[in-house]
Image: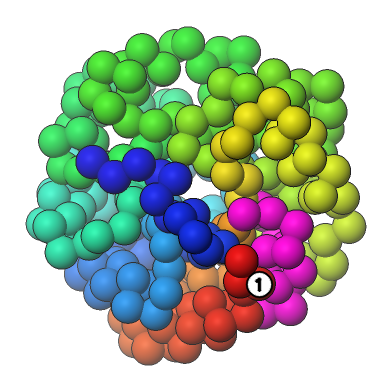
Amino acid sequence: MIKLKEAFKNKKAFIAFLTAGDPDLETTEKLIYEMVDKGVDLIEIGIPFSDPIAEGTVIQEADLRALSGGVTTEMIFDMVEKIRPDIKIPLVFMTYCNVLFGYGTEKFTKRCSEIGIDGLIVPDVPYEEKEELLPYCRKYGLELVSLVAPTSQDRIAKIASEAEGFLYIVSSLGVTGVRSEITTDIGEIVRAAKAVSDIPCAVGFGISTPEQAKKMSAEADGIIIGSAIVKIIAKYGRESVEPVGEYIKSISDSLIKY
């Protein structure tokens, strides 16, 4: 298994998200290879869920397309197991607690370990309730990524002090989605986290342009992009590999270097 911190080694990390099975798993495979080839340092693979509360319309619709196409969690496990030997960067699953509980939390985390998943992001499991999931992650060697939001304030230091892999900084209130401007003081959140831990900090929710990526990479250790990628996949479907690759390269080229 690969430690998530490897994505940040001597560089600003580019973390990319896509929904598994949108438009189909064969295209998802091709997209993952293309993302790696064009400079992504860590990939969040979204397991589609019928009620993704942290997601905006773009990713909600991607989840519905994947589910309507018949994609299951088991099929996603099989896809990752197939490609994992070729992928040399960290892979994490982004999903919701109902998916874990429905599959069986221990069975799910054990399977993740077997296929080479390195960590989990579960937005609807808050810091105060992570003990429901953490023992299983520890047992099977997965890093459980913690999230902090602009409203976390006094909780930032506490969350950061126990965070694993990297700290996911939610740049804006509300759900995921492309935003024309990010006004949160990311630097302040990063400084609060760094005061108690050397955990890498990555910023997500709303980044879509090379200019935003450059600005945010100056404030933090990495950036996370999801909705902007999923919008391209929605537009081009099975022909999305090349346009996604071009977009990924434009973002990767824009990042502030160490």
Amino acid under disc 1 = Ile
Residue name at image x 33 percent, y 19 percent: 138
Tell me the element at label 1.
Answer: loop
Crowd tier of the residue under label 1, counting other residues whose Cα lies within 10 Å: few below 14, some 14–19, many 20 or above: some
> In the image, 248: left or right of 36?
right
> Can you give x and y, in whole percent of width and height, for residue 185 in the image?
87, 50
| Occupied quadrant, residue 227 | bottom right
Which residues are drawn in magenta? 203-221
Seen at 56% across and 82% down, the residue is 253
Residue 237, picture quadrant: bottom left
Give the mark count: 1
149 in magenta: no
Q: Residue 155 in the image: state x and y as whole percent.
A: 76, 21
Residue at image mark 1: 256
- Image coordinates of residue 5 in percent, x first then y, are 44, 45
Residue 11 visible: yes
| Quadrant, the C terminus | bottom right
